Image: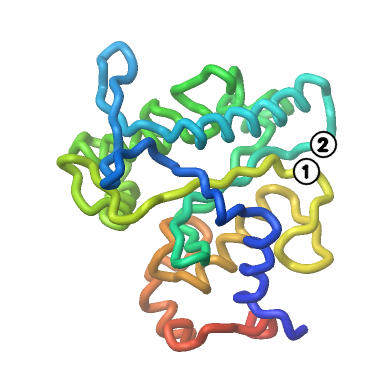
Amino acid sequence: MADTKHVLWSRWVDRFIDTADPIPLFETASDGTVETIEYGRSGRRVLHRGERMERALRTAGTRVATDHERRGQTYEGLVYMMYTLDGEGVVPRYIGKCGKFGASGTTLNSNLKNVETNDGKLARWGYGRYYHFGDLSAAVFDEEGAKKYDRWVTELFDSTDPPRLDEPVYFWVEPWEVGTEGPYPDTYPYLEELEYQLIGIAFEQFPNRLLNTEGVPINPEAYAEMRGWAERTETRLSDF
C-alpha cells in the first residue's frame, strides 16, 4: 500500500476539520490572554471555554445523548481534538473521545448527562476537577492537580500571570457514527479503536507536539529519533 501516515493525516483533516473557520478552544482577548471566570460554590478561578467551542460540544453531545434516550444505534460517542495551526496545516495537540455508555452496562455516560447545561463535566471538558478545563486551570493557577496538565501549560501558554497563549488553540468535535470509515481506507473502527488509530498517526507526524500520554511511547523524543521520524516527512504503512 502506497499510502503514508502523512497522507492519512492530511486526508482525515480534509474530511473533518474546517481550517478556514477554526473553533477557538478558549475565550481570549486580542493578545491571546485567556479570559477567566469564577466557578462553583468556592468561586474557583478557571479558564473560560470558548463560546463557539462550548456550543459545538453541547450540540454534538446532545446528538449522542438523544440517540441513547431513543435507544438508537446511530452514534458511539464523541471524538475530539485540541489543535493548533501551522499555516493551514493542523497540528494535533490532544486527541480523545467520550463514549456513549458508562463504565458499567448500557447507561448513558455520566459525562454526557444533562450535556446542554452541565458545566462541571461537559463531555470531559468541564470546569470541575478531574476534567480538562478544571485541571488545566488548576495547573495554570498553581493549584494541586494532575501532573499531565503541567505539560499542557508549558506547551500552550506563553505566560500564566496573566494566562496568555503562545499561539491560538482550536477545538474539533464529531459525533462518531457507527460504520463511518476511519483514517485507514476501507476500515470502520469502533470509537476506542478510532481514538488510538488517530493518536498513532498523529504521534508519528508530531511526536514532540502531541500531548497525549496514553497510546504513545513514554519518551517521545527518543522514540522519534530511533524511528527516524525527526528526519522523514513520510512513513509507509508497511513500516508498521
Image position of 152 (left or right of 8)? left
Which quadrant holds residue 5?
bottom right
The earlier-in-sequence mark between 2 and 1 is 2
Instruction: Residue 217 in the image: state x and y as whole percent.
Output: 45, 68
Q: From mark 2 to mark 1, how far is it between C-alphas?
A: 6 Å
Question: What element does badge 1 sit on?
Answer: strand
- Amino acid carrying label 1: it is Glu
Q: Residue at x 29, y 46 (%)?
A: 32
What residue is at 39 percent from the left and 28 percent from the top?
A: 127
- Please, what secondary structure does the residue beneath circle 2 have? loop
- Residue sitting at x 36%, y 31%: 48
How far from the left and from the top, in percent, is residue 83?
Answer: 47, 54
Dot 1 alpha-carbon crowd within 10 angstroms: few under 14, some 14 to 19, many 20 or more: some
Q: Is residue 1 above or below residue 206?
A: below
Question: Residue 204, can we see it?
Answer: yes
Query: Taking 240 as reference, is 154 above or below it?
Result: above
